[in-house]
Image (cartoon, rainbow, N blue to C red):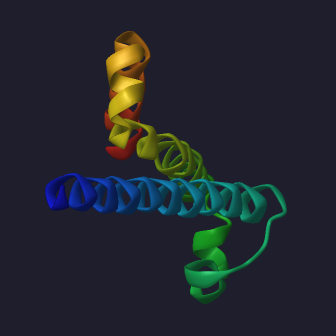
């Protein structure tokens, strides 16, 4: 009986961990989009020289990095859901491929 109770505690901790991971990942992705679309000079951007900020290649690279990173972070947590993988294997694989591509930008 103790083994069943321990399993329930572990299962509850895992659900809470996945829930927390999902909230943090989605929040980080949303925050990235908010900063990107509102042109907020935050973090490392505020310390860059104006010549670098006016470079169109650097700006394009940063834009791709922010967008792809936000998408990778926002969708990556889904890969940790066992029921998602079991019931929707094709979507799980597609999100995995998207995550891999967007992670290596």
The relative height of residue 25 versus residue 44 in the rendered view (above or below) is above
Residue found at the far right of this picture: 38
Q: Is residue 21 visible?
A: yes
Q: Quadrant of the N terminus?
A: bottom left
Depth order, front residue of 33/88: 88
Residue at figure coordinates x 32%, y 62% from the top left: 9
- Residue name at image x 38 percent, y 28 percent: 83
- Rendered residue at 56%/51% (across/down): 70
Left or right of residue 38, residue 49 in this image: left
Q: Nearer the viewer, residue 20 or 29?
A: 20
The residue nearer to you, when weighing 18 against 39, is 18
46 left or right, relative to 102: right
**Residue 30: percent from the left, percent from the top?**
69, 56
Q: What is the residue that sits farthest to the left in this orientation?
A: 3
Q: Is residue 47 left or right of residue 94?
A: right
**Number of numbered discs:** 0
**Which residue extends farthest bottom?**
47
Residue 101, image quadrant: top left
Quarter in which the C terminus is drawn: top left
Location of residue 41 with respect to 8 vertically, above or below: below
Give percent across and percent down for residue 33: 71, 54
**Residue at horizontal 34 percent and vertical 24 percent from the top:** 85
Q: Give the x, y percent position of residue 44.
A: 55, 81
């Amino acid at each position: 009986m103790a083994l069943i109770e321990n399993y329930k505690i572990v299962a509850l901790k895992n659900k809470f961990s996945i829930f927390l991971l999902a909230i943090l990942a989605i929040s980080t992705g949303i925050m990235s989009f908010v900063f990107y679309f509102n042109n907020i000079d935050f973090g490392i951007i505020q310390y860059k020289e104006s010549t670098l900020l006016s470079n169109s290649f650097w700006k394009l690279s940063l834009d791709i990095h922010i967008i792809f990173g936000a998408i990778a972070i926002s969708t990556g947590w889904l890969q940790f859901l066992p029921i998602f993988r079991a019931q929707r294997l094709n979507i799980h694989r597609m999100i995995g491929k998207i995550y891999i591509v967007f992670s290596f930008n």
